[in-house]
Image (cartoon, rainbow, N blue to C red):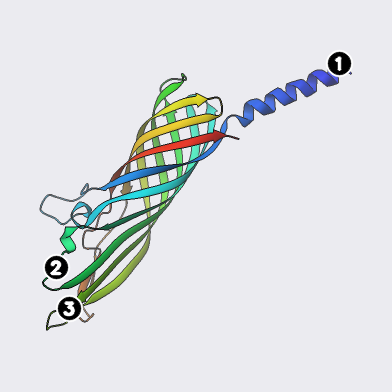
């Protein structure tokens, strides 16, 4: 009986220890469009989009206190910038929405209550870019389109993880989203002809804060 009781105790302690290695939570972030990947004389994402808000669900599994694996499922929305302000020609409504589905790995430089870290996420981005231009010109130039496209991408992170308690973590990080193979698409046969996603690259930098809770 003593052996059985001892084994049950070890099993319970083991389960508690493992459970604390799994965390689930969320984050909010503020994103800044970037012209990274474009030359200074080319139209870039920073030129056509405003800053925007994002929210995400986070999960982390700590292999040990120096290494973690996880996921990031998020949504972001941005309005168009003053680039689209053409009051003399009509009204323009523009939006850039992004869904991302990312896997993440991170290395922590300490195992103390405050842990600086470097992380890297990779996965898929679903981009929904919409423009609705109602022309008031004599020559009708109205254009309406919604471009929907999947693209792969990577997102390096630099952050700080604060252990508020054994089951509560505060995560603050800066993230750079680099979305691959984003290109403009020209439609010469449309009336009028137009270019979809003229900014091409859709990279950005965001500042994020999140809370994770031990399972």
Q: Which residue is mark 2?
A: 86
Which class describes the residues within 10 Å of circle 3: few (<14), some (14-19), or many (20+)? some
* In the rendered image, the vertical position of residue 173 relative to residue 50, given as above or below: above
Decide: few, some or many residues near mark 2? Use Cα within 10 Å; few <14, some 14-19, many ≥20.
Answer: few
Picture coordinates of residue 30 (x, y %)? 32, 44
Residue to which mark 1 is pinned: 2
Horizontal arrangement in the rendering, residue 26 relative to residue 141 (left or right): right
- Residue position marked by numbered label 3 in the rendering: 141
Tag 2's secondary structure? loop
Residue located 50% across and 35% down the image: 212
| The image quarter in which residue 172 lies | top left
Q: Residue at x 49, y 32 (%)?
A: 68
Residue mark closest to the camera, 2 vs 1: 2
Residue 196: image x %, image y %?
Answer: 25, 67
- Asked if labels 1 and 2 touch by Cβ distance under 8 angstroms, the answer is no
Which residue is rendered at x = 27% and y = 58% of the image? 79
Residue in the image at 85% along x and 21% along y: 4
Seen from this angle, which residue lies furthest right?
1
- For residue 185, side relative to residue 76 (left or right): left
Position of residue 128 relative to residue 109, above or below, is below
Q: Counting residues from the N terminus, which is met first, the one under dot 2 or under dot 3?
A: 2
Disc with the residue nearer the chain's start (2 vs 1): 1
- Left or right, 18 with respect to 9, comes to left
For marks 3 and 1, the one nearer the N-term is 1
User: Quick one: quadrant of the N terminus?
Assistant: top right
Quick one: 99 or 88, which is closer to the camera? Answer: 88
The alpha-carbon separation of the residues under discs 3 and 1 comes to: 85 Å
Q: Are marks 3 and 1 in contact (CB under 8 Å)?
A: no
Label 3: state its secondary structure: loop
Q: Quadrant of the C terminus?
A: top right
At numbered mark 1, what does the secondary structure look like: helix, strand or loop? helix
């Amino acid at each position: 009986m003593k052996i059985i009781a001892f084994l049950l105790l070890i099993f319970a302690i083991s389960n508690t220890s493992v459970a604390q290695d799994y965390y689930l939570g969320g984050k909010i972030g503020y994103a800044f469009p970037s012209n990274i990947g474009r030359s200074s004389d080319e139209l870039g994402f920073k030129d056509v989009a405003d800053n925007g808000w994002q929210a995400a669900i986070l999960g982390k599994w700590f292999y040990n206190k120096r290494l973690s694996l996880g996921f990031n499922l998020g949504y972001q929305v941005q309005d168009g910038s003053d680039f689209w302000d053409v009051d003399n020609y009509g009204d323009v409504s523009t939006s850039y929405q992004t869904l991302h589905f990312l896997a993440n790995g991170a290395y922590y430089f300490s195992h103390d209550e405050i842990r600086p870290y470097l992380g890297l996420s990779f996965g898929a981005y679903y981009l929904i870019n919409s423009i609705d231009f109602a022309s008031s010109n004599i020559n009708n130039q109205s254009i309406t389109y919604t471009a929907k496209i999947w693209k792969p991408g990577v997102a390096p992170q630099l952050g700080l993880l604060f252990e508020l308690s054994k089951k509560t973590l505060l995560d603050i990080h800066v993230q750079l989203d680099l979305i691959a193979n984003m290109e403009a698409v020209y439609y010469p046969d449309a009336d009028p002809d137009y270019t979809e996603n003229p900014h091409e690259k859709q990279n950005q930098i965001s500042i994020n804060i999140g809370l994770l809770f031990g399972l």
